[in-house]
Image (spheres, rainbow, N blue to C red):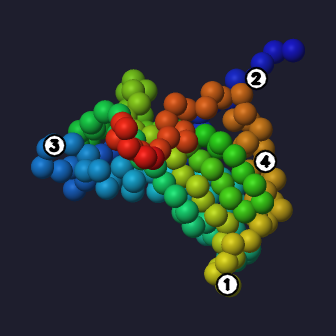
Amino acid sequence: MTEQRVEPLVTWRGKVAPEWVDYNGHLRDAYYLLVFSFATDGVMDLIGLDAPGRAATGHTLYTLETHLNYLQEVKEAVAIVVHTQVLGVDTKRLHLFHTLVRQADGLGLATNEQMLCNIDTAGPRSAPFAPAVADRLASLVEAHRPWPRPAQAGCSIALPGTRA
């Protein structure tokens, strides 16, 4: 049996806008998270929580936690792409790992790990994913299972010798 290679899931692409650049001449830290937020929107579109899906189900995603790692500086006008790996899912939560890369050569620029919760907006309160969304997520988890776990996934922040 031959192993099926799964291509990276591209969830956002664009260029570093001039208004995103800070006084050091590179992408301002807050805009990394904006780009990753757009990538999460791309995942939502893919799994059926786009605008029509949200209207039909009354569901959306809220971010519970996010971790951002800066790996390389990014300059104005650089073409960038976000690849996303689904690390896990349960009845209400989605664990994503985004990697921002330079489009020209695939150099890793930053990573972002997110824990998201499915929300019934009528409450608002947490709720199980709609069946069609759950099925799409299960397919993504299965497709991403062979991928190695990213080095930054699950990391915490602490100074050496201090409590995490």
> What whole-number distance in Å separates the C-alpha atoms at marks 1 and 2?
42 Å
Amino acid type shown at disc 2 = Gln
Which of disc 1 and disc 4 is earlier in sequence? Answer: 1
| Disc 3 to disc 4: CB gap under 8 Å | no
Q: Badge 1: few (under 14), some or many (20 or more) residues near its Cα, within 10 Å?
A: few
Mark 2 vs mark 4, foreground winner is 4
| Viewer-side residue, 43 vs 127 | 127
Which of disc 3 and disc 2 is earlier in sequence? Answer: 2
Residue bearing the label numbered 4 = 138
Residue bearing the label numbered 3 = 25
| Viewer-side residue, 160 vs 131 | 160
Residue at the left extreme of this rendering: 23
Q: Quadrant of residue 50?
A: bottom right
Residue bearing the label numbered 1 = 123
> What whole-number distance in Å separates the C-alpha atoms at marks 2 and 4?
17 Å
Amino acid type shown at disc 4 = Ala
| Viewer-side residue, 62 vs 80 | 62
Secondary structure state at the residue bearing disc 2: loop
Which of disc 4 and disc 2 is earlier in sequence? Answer: 2
On the picture, is 161 further left or further right than 20?
right
Which of disc 1 and disc 3 is earlier in sequence? Answer: 3
Q: Which mark is residue 4?
A: 2
Residue under the image location 25 percent in, 50 percent down: 28
| Viewer-side residue, 136 vs 85 | 85
Amino acid type shown at disc 3 = Gly
